[in-house]
Image (spheres, rainbow, N blue to C red):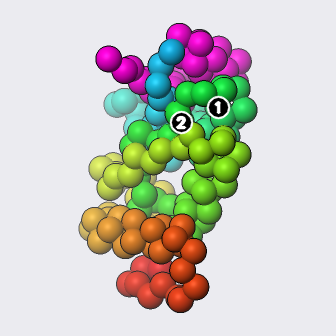
Amino acid sequence: MEFWTNVPLFGPGIDGPLIADYVEAADELGFVALGAPDHVIVAADHEPAGYRTVIESIVALSFIAARTKRIRIGTSIMAVPLRGAVLLAKQLASLDVLSDGRVFAGLGLGNFPAEFALVGADFHTRGAYLDETIQLMRHLWSGQQDPFVGRFN
């Protein structure tokens, strides 16, 4: 049986040393993967102390890659419509190179309208945006030279 865990990236007391200790222990204990939850904000009803520390997932994964040796790392689950598709594809590809191919991406729609409002994204087109972003990523990562034409990108 294989085990994976999510890295604590939001809430009171979250900081670099805590995250480093957590991921180094998971790597040493033989976990197969670490997932980084992805939120722009955390609503007060999810964290009683309100909008405190929320570490950005791609930045956290870069930190985690440098603190671990073999464990797979990735998003669990990233709200893709909150991000620019081309930049996200570049970030994930760069992270994969820097981590020696240990990256996976859990991609999703997002379900908190407040996060969409905060970044100016359309909550109602998130499904179509996610579909197109996956197509764009595959196109970019394949090395194709022809331009990608889509509704959003």
Magenta segment includes 13? yes
Q: Is residue 146 above or below residue 19?
A: below
For the residues labelled 1 and 2, the Cα–Cα distance comes to 8 Å
Q: Is residue 146 visible?
A: yes
* Amino acid type at image mark 2: Ile
Residue drawn at point x = 57 percent, y = 40 percent: 102
- For the residue pair 19 and 125, the one nearer the viewer reads as 19
* Amino acid type at image mark 1: Ile
Sooner in the amino-acid sequence: mark 1 or mark 2: 1
For the residue carrying disc 2, how many other residues have a C-alpha within 10 Å: few (<14), some (14-19), or many (20+)? many
Q: Quadrant of residue 130?
A: bottom left
Report the magenta residues as a range: 1-29
Tag 2 secondary structure:
strand
Q: Quadrant of residue 131?
A: bottom left
Q: Is residue 31 above or below residue 153?
A: above
Residue drawn at point x = 64 percent, y = 31 percent: 64
Tag 1 secondary structure:
helix
Whole-percent x and y of residue 121? Answer: 42, 66
Whole-percent x and y of residue 139? Answer: 48, 74
For the residue carrying disc 1, how many other residues have a C-alpha within 10 Å: few (<14), some (14-19), or many (20+)? many
Q: Is residue 133 above or below residue 58?
A: below
Magenta segment includes 110? no
Name the residue beneath numbered marker 2: 73
Q: Is residue 122 visible?
A: no
Whole-percent x and y of residue 35? Answer: 47, 33
Q: Are marks 1 and 2 in contact (CB under 8 Å)?
A: yes
Name the residue beneath numbered marker 1: 64
